Amino acid sequence: MEVKYTPHGEPGKTCAHCNFYTPKPDNPGKGDCFGHEVEGQGSCNQFQPKDA
Ligand code: SF4
């Protein structure tokens, strides 16, 4: 699986809105995704909306 990560995702399609994002308890702007640290503003081609 190739992941194309970008540090600035389109509005509404960012890591912060993604099903795979787990925000850090002390800093919701950063989080974990499959064991990787990502920015809440980032995004990638595996984006999946939270409610899906
Ligand atoms: S799957 Fe992609 S968009 Fe979703 S949290 Fe991980 S890096 Fe961000």
Image: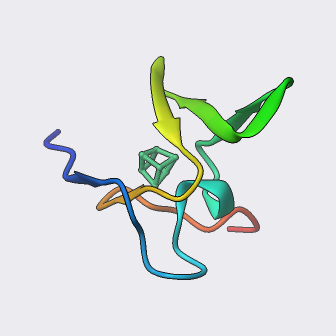
| Left or right of residue 40, residue 3 in this image | left
Tell me where residue 20 appears, x and y as whole percent.
58, 43
Tell me where residue 46 appears, x and y as whole percent.
36, 56
Tell me where residue 7 appears, x and y as whole percent.
35, 54
Question: In which quarter of the view is residue 11 placed?
Answer: bottom right
52 and 8: which is toward the camera: 8
Tell me where residue 40 appears, x and y as whole percent.
59, 50
**Split into 4 quadrants, where in the image is the C terminus?**
bottom right
Task: Tell me what residue is drawn at x 70 percent, y 34 percent.
Answer: 22
How many numbered badges does the structure rendering display? 0
Q: Residue furthest top?
A: 35
Q: Residue furthest right?
A: 25
| Left or right of residue 36, residue 19 in this image | right
| Left or right of residue 35, residue 45 in this image | left
**Split into 4 quadrants, where in the image is the N terminus?**
top left
Task: Tell me what residue is drawn at x 60 percent, y 57 percent.
Answer: 18
5 and 41: which is toward the camera: 41
Task: Tell me what residue is drawn at x 60 percent, y 80 percent.
Answer: 12
